[in-house]
Image: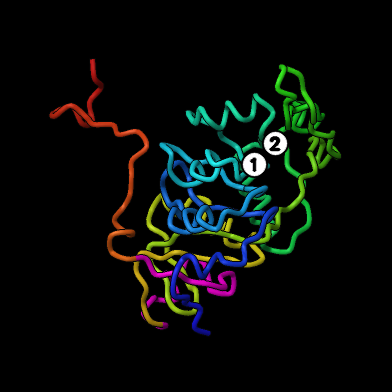
Amino acid sequence: MDKVVGSAAEAVADVRDGASLAVGGFGLSGVPEVLLNAVHETGVGGLGVVSNNCGALDRGLAVLLAAGRIARVTGSYIGANKEFARRYLAGELEVELIPQGTLAERLRAGGAGIPAFYTPAGVGTQVADGGLPWRYDGAGGVAVASPPKEVREFDGRPHVLERGIRTDFGLVRAAKGDRHGNLVFAKSARNFNPLAAMAGRLTIAEVEELVEPGAIDPDQVHLPGVFVQRVVALTPEQAADKQIERRTVAVPGTAGRERR
């Protein structure tokens, strides 16, 4: 039952070329950076990544992206990641962009053993009708486009069929975890982490604080250890290394009032 491994390098040692990874995080919040850096150090490539976005400020998945290790991304947000946009438009990267709520549910469904589900999100758009550019040819044309999806009516409203997502590995970051893999996430860092953990066939969690079994109140567990196979305890320095993607500072005395 003790799932703790000695290092991040040991935890990701069996990630191979072409593996698929479900990665938690949103922007720079809750990103398993230590595990991602360890994957980078292995030198593996051709990776398929499922994550909300693909890193920011040259951190997280942006490290693997810049090194050309990622072949395909399933996500919902490119954002201000210029290297992501450049590689996508140059035909160096295949990208499946899907609605954010649909991405979350596809991960959850995959982890729950649900092969597919219907949702109204995307009906009447290229999400359902097909034609979204998955890969460009580098000259402005579309090399690979998304196929059409099944649409079915429920209670007089059309819904599109979406498939659950399963990946070879899940990489997540938690504020606290025990040796059995039970995890607690901090505030907004909870984001996609539980879903990515559920979707991975083998899930690795880096935890800022490692505690003994029983130290976490069962009612406070955000993700049960059944979804986690390996746990990596971060050093205090690694746990404290947190960046803010866009720092916003209020003018003193204006909090709660409209600024003019």
Horizontal arrangement in the rendering, residue 229 relative to residue 213 (left or right) = right
Q: Which residue is mark 2?
A: 94
Callout 1 amino acid: Val
Q: Quadrant of residue 111?
A: bottom right
Horizontal arrangement in the rendering, residue 119 relative to residue 244 (left or right) = right
Q: Quadrant of residue 139?
A: top right
Q: In which quadrant will I find the C terminus?
A: top left
Q: x%, y% of residue 189?
A: 42, 52
**Residue at point 46% right, 65% down?**
8
Local SS, label 2: strand
Residue 245 sits above or below residue 230 on the image: above
Q: Nearer the viewer, residue 67 or 165?
A: 67
Judged from this view, the residue extending furthest toward the left is 253
Instruction: Write down the region rendered in magenta.
Output: 213-234
Local SS, label 1: strand
Q: x%, y% of residue 151?
A: 84, 37
Q: Which residue is mark 1?
A: 73
**Is residue 25 among the parts visible in the rendering?**
yes
**Residue at point 56% right, 32% down?**
84
Say whether disc 1 or disc 2 marks the residue closer to the N-terminus: 1
**Residue at point 45% right, 51% down?**
31
229 drawn magenta: yes
Residue 248 sits above or below residue 226 on the image: above
Residue 199 sits above or below residue 1 on the image: above
Q: x%, y% of residue 254?
A: 18, 27
Callout 2 amino acid: Glu
Q: Quadrant of residue 178?
A: bottom left
- CB under 8 Å between callouts 1 and 2? yes
Q: x%, y% of residue 209?
A: 34, 69
10 drawn magenta: no
